[in-house]
Image (spheres, rainbow, N blue to C red):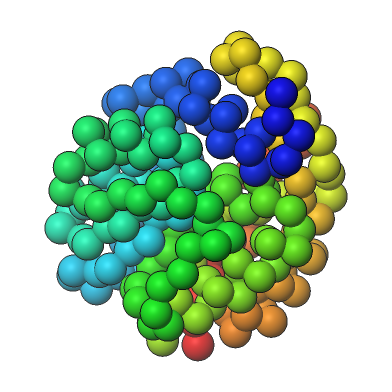
Amino acid sequence: MPSEPKEIVRRGYDAVSERYRADDDEPPAYTAWLADLRAWLPPIASVLDLGCGCGVPISRTLADLGHDVLGVDISAVQVERARRLVPAARFIQADAASFSVAPGSFDAIVCLYMLIHLPHGEQEALIRNLGTWLKPGGVLLATVGATAWTGEEEDWLGGGERMWWSHPGAETYRHWLTSAGLIIERDEFVPEGSSGHQMVMARRG
């Protein structure tokens, strides 16, 4: 069994890709967040879907609207499904912490339930990168941990592999976002079971 956190994450999503997200899945929260994001986008936007999973529903919805979408995910299974399900977008298998693009490349970056799978130092560094990758006025839509917690789960979603998460809490994320030059426009708690996450929408000044 792997012990390195990101290898646990990669193997975990490879194992549960279809259990985690069906081909036609459209979670209500995602639909609402996408509606909010669309209000910030130009008619044809360049969008990075970081931690894109199988491309549903974020990449597919934005590509169907005519936006130029690039999806990045650590899981080869997820990326293979995304290429099949969303042929109008481009997808790359990569570790988000080592992924790099030119400054000012994107009108928007979507990063849902991905940061929390990285070690804290890599999360902070990636958030700094997100701030530079956005064009002036560009928007970041992200979910982060609401409270401080690190842990893992055996046999995640019945896929036979572990999963690992770590997050320092909402206040730390707010500090990282503002230090990256981002202005927080929305900051909302998203309940999930006995805990939850924080949804933030921030723009580059």
3 vs 116: above or below? above
Q: Quadrant of residue 154?
A: top right
* Numbered-mark total: 0
53 vs 15: above or below? below
Q: Quadrant of residue 8?
A: top right
> Which one is nearer the viewer's eye here, 118 or 35?
118
* Quarter of the rendering occupied by the N terminus: top right
Residue 60 locus on image (x, y percent): 26, 44
The reply to whether residue 73 is visible in this rendering is yes
Kindly identify the residue that appears in the image at 84 percent across and 50 percent down. 148
189 vs 108: above or below? above
Kindly identify the residue that appears in the image at 76 percent across and 34 percent down. 3
The reply to whether residue 34 is visible in this rendering is no
Kindly identify the residue that appears in the image at 51 percent across and 21 percent down. 16
> Which one is nearer the viewer's eye here, 69 or 175?
69
Residue 111 locus on image (x, y percent): 50, 55
Kindly identify the residue that appears in the image at 41 percent across and 73 percent down. 101
51 vs 96: above or below? above
Residue 150 locus on image (x, y percent): 82, 42
Q: Is residue 101 left or right of residue 128?
A: left
> Which one is nearer the viewer's eye here, 168 or 153?
153
Q: Is residue 24 left or right of residue 159?
A: left
Residue 162 locus on image (x, y percent): 69, 24
